[in-house]
């Protein structure tokens, strides 16, 4: 058996492949962005074929840097909720993938929420929101005639991006997902651990073929021989944020992490205890074969690093995300400038799809540095919003925040986050903990290493301790909350 595990991290703006060795070190990696499609304001789509093409590109680049014969297992982790529907017989999608950020079904969700919010929350742990997959499926069925016809013939397959990737990795032999992804669809009953016929009927997803739900740490088939030169087992599948929690060693209750990626995703492990929250999401963390579901509480802010990308690509205020650190640090303070990044509404704990992005406090002296700093500060403020919404007994036990994701490379942001929270922020030595977590899970499945060995390998790159006075931090946070109030309901 080889000693490498290939982690495939299928993100919102691009895909990544990383080969990890038996010491959990990345020995080769590749990344490829794919196109973001915005057919209307608030709508976000991806081309499923482009997603798959970039996955293959990354795998091929990595396999040129390592001996493919040493790859013992493949792991998949993915942007969750994004919805792909395709023809079982031809393998062709009937529509672009509708991305988790897309708000096209917000009005329909509001109608359903008025009648079914409590029932759906009890069954799924989620709020009825356009973020999740169910109303995206219904939209395709209602607006794409081919989809309705294929559903009537039992040929229309549904999957989140992990399912689409596994379908293609296995040569169209396996149509499967895991509970961490299934629990993000609004169609999966997290109490009973199964697809829920009542929810399928309620959300209008009848006729669509849902994937088989297998334990997160289990065998999902083997890759086509052509991809890596031989068939390699796909031995783990987790949603990206659950994979990041796994990658941070968050196996015990009260383990807390925040991922600074396209969005901001804070998860706290609750073990086998299913804890419902009125402001946060209850989700499946993962499942090991032969064991019960593990749960987590999650707070999802839709726009984190995506705001920096928007400043770069949409407004041309910066040429690279790396510039933002020096620009923010060049100012003595924010001079009253705030940015509420409600570019696709607000997620947890506000759940306001009618909120819109706003810059506030602008004056004649405002420069682009202020706007960039405000976007960075917004990540820290949104993270505190979610922590404030945690149950009191959980919040009271928090001593530090584990941080991962691309934006954690920004030292200014990490220091500001520690200051606003008033607790240390521990930056992972491996920024790509999402891929690491999935790879670690796959390695455990095929017996390359144990959970204990993985925990012993955990490394912190740097600890950021608070330096700002609490009075000043509370003043800044109070002003942020006022800014959020101004942004709510703007698009109603």
Image: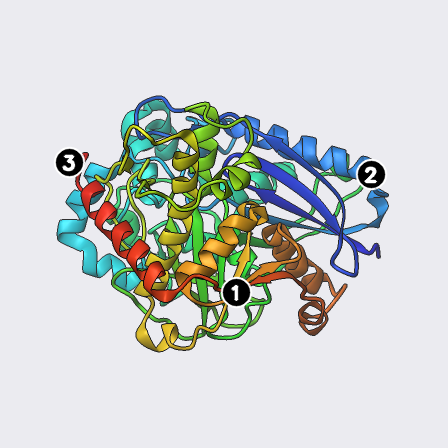
- Above or below — where is 465 with respect to 78? below
Given residues 10 and 385, the one toward you in this image is: 385
- Above or below — where is 99 with respect to 214? above
Numbered disc 3: secondary structure: loop
Q: Label for residue 65? A: 2
Q: Label for residue 492? A: 3
Work out whether mark 2 precedes mark 1 in sequence or the reverse, and give the earlier one.
Answer: 2
| Disc 1 to disc 3: CB gap under 8 Å | no
In the figure, is residue 262 to the left or right of 51? left
The CA span between labels 1 and 3 is 41 Å
Give the mark toward the camera: 1 or 3: 1
Numbered disc 2: secondary structure: helix
Rendering coords of residue 130 (x, y %): 30, 42
Given residues 305 and 277, the one toward you in this image is: 305
| Residue beneath the point at 60% across and 37% down | 15
Task: Quickly name the residue at label 1.
Answer: 465
Number of numbered labels in the structure image: 3
The CA span between labels 2 and 1 is 38 Å
Numbered disc 1: secondary structure: loop
- Above or below — where is 171 with respect to 198? above
Label 1 Cα crowd, 10 Å radius (few <14 / some 14-19 / many 20+): some
Rendering coords of residue 322 (x, y %): 57, 37
| Residue beneath the point at 74% across and 66% down | 449
Q: Label for residue 247? A: none
The CA span between labels 3 and 2 is 52 Å
């Amino acid at each position: 058996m080889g000693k490498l595990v290939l982690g495939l991290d299928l993100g919102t703006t691009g895909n990544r492949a990383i080969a990890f060795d038996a010491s959990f070190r990345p020995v080769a990696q590749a990344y490829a962005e794919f196109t973001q499609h915005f057919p209307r304001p608030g709508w976000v789509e991806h081309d499923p074929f482009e997603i798959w093409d970039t996955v293959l590109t990354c795998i091929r680049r990595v396999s040129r840097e390592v001996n493919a014969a040493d790859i013992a297992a493949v792991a998949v982790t993915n942007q969750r909720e994004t919805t792909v529907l395709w023809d079982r017989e031809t393998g062709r999608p009937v529509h672009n993938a509708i991305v988790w950020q897309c708000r096209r079904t917000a009005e329909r969700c509001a109608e359903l929420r008025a009648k079914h919010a409590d029932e759906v929350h009890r069954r799924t742990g989620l709020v009825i929101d356009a973020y999740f997959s169910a109303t995206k499926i219904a939209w395709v069925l209602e607006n794409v005639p081919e989809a309705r016809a294929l559903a009537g013939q039992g040929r229309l397959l549904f999957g989140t991006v992990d399912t689409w990737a596994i379908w293609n990795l296995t040569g169209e032999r396996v149509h499967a997902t895991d509970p961490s992804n299934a629990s993000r669809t609004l169609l999966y009953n997290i109490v009973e651990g199964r697809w829920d016929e009542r929810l399928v009927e309620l959300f209008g997803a009848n006729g669509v073929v849902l994937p088989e739900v297998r334990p997160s740490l289990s065998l999902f088939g083997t890759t086509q021989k052509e991809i890596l030169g031989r068939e390699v087992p796909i031995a783990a599948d987790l949603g990206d944020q659950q994979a990041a929690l796994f990658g941070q060693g968050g196996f015990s209750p009260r383990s807390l992490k925040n991922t600074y990626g396209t969005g901001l995703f804070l998860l706290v492990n609750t073990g086998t205890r299913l804890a419902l929250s009125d402001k946060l999401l209850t989700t499946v963390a993962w499942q090991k074969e032969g064991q019960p579901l593990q749960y987590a509480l999650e707070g999802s802010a839709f726009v984190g690093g995506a705001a920096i990308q928007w400043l770069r690509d949409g407004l041309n205020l910066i040429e690279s995300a790396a510039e933002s650190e020096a620009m923010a640090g060049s100012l003595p303070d924010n001079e009253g400038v705030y940015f509420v990044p409600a570019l696709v509404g607000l997620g947890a704990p506000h759940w306001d799809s009618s909120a819109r992005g706003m810059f506030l406090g602008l004056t004649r002296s405002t420069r682009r540095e202020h706007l960039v700093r405000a976007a960075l500060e917004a990540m820290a403020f949104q993270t505190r919003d979610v922590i404030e919404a945690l149950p009191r007994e959980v919040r009271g036990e928090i001593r530090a925040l584990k941080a991962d994701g691309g934006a954690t490379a920004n030292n200014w942001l990490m220091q500001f986050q520690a200051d606003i929270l008033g607790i240390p922020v521990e930056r992972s030595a491996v920024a790509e903990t999402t891929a690491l977590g999935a790879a670690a899970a796959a390695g455990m499945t095929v017996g390359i290493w144990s959970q204990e060995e993985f925990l012993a390998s955990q490394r912190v790159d740097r600890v950021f301790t608070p330096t700002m006075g609490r009075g000043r931090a509370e003043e800044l946070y109070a002003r942020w909350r006022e800014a959020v109030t101004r942004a709510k309901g703007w698009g109603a």
